[in-house]
Image (tube, rainbow, N blue to C red):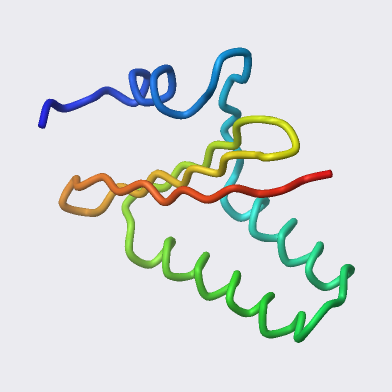
Amino acid sequence: FPTRRSSDLENSVLHTAGNLPEAVDLDDFFNKCIRNVMIGGGDRPELVAQQYRNLAYFIHSNTKKSILYRCGNIQVGIYIVLITEEGKVFVLKTTSIET
């Protein structure tokens, strides 16, 4: 597979027409998720909050660098780019519904 520069990734994969990706601090993102879970209640919010904490810890402990991008409105694409010590790149993708 050809190697892509991060700017290529941002411009060709991370966003649809009219929506530019926005880099967000990983800890700020997870802290917001945890705060929203705790405020929103629902079933077992402390368990869900701990799962977010565990994921953030795993990312910090197993990567040399991580970058989080948000893209879109309402159905927001979340892309977490992980770069390992060996230079391998992985991308986690999910969708956040924000109304």
What x and y, as percent, mark residue 65?
37, 47
Instruction: Specify the farthest residue to the top.
Output: 18
Residue at x 33%, y 57% (from the top left corner): 63
Quadrant into which the C terminus falls: top right
Residue at x 62%, y 20% (from the top left corner): 19
How many labels, in total?
0
What x and y, as percent, mark residue 7?
37, 19
Residue at x 53%, y 50% (from the top left corner): 94
Q: Quadrant of residue 46?
A: bottom right
Relative to 22, 81 lies left or right: left
- Viewer-side residue, 35 vs 76: 76
Relative to 57, 32 lies left or right: right
Instruction: Specify the farthest residue to the left.
Output: 1
Above-or-below relation of 96 to 17: below
- Viewer-side residue, 65 vs 52: 52
Above-or-below relation of 31 to 2: below
Above-or-below relation of 65 to 51: above
Residue at x 52%, y 25% (from the top left corner): 15
Relative to 76, 2 lies left or right: left
What x and y, as percent, mark residue 12?
39, 19
What x and y, as percent, mark residue 76?
65, 39
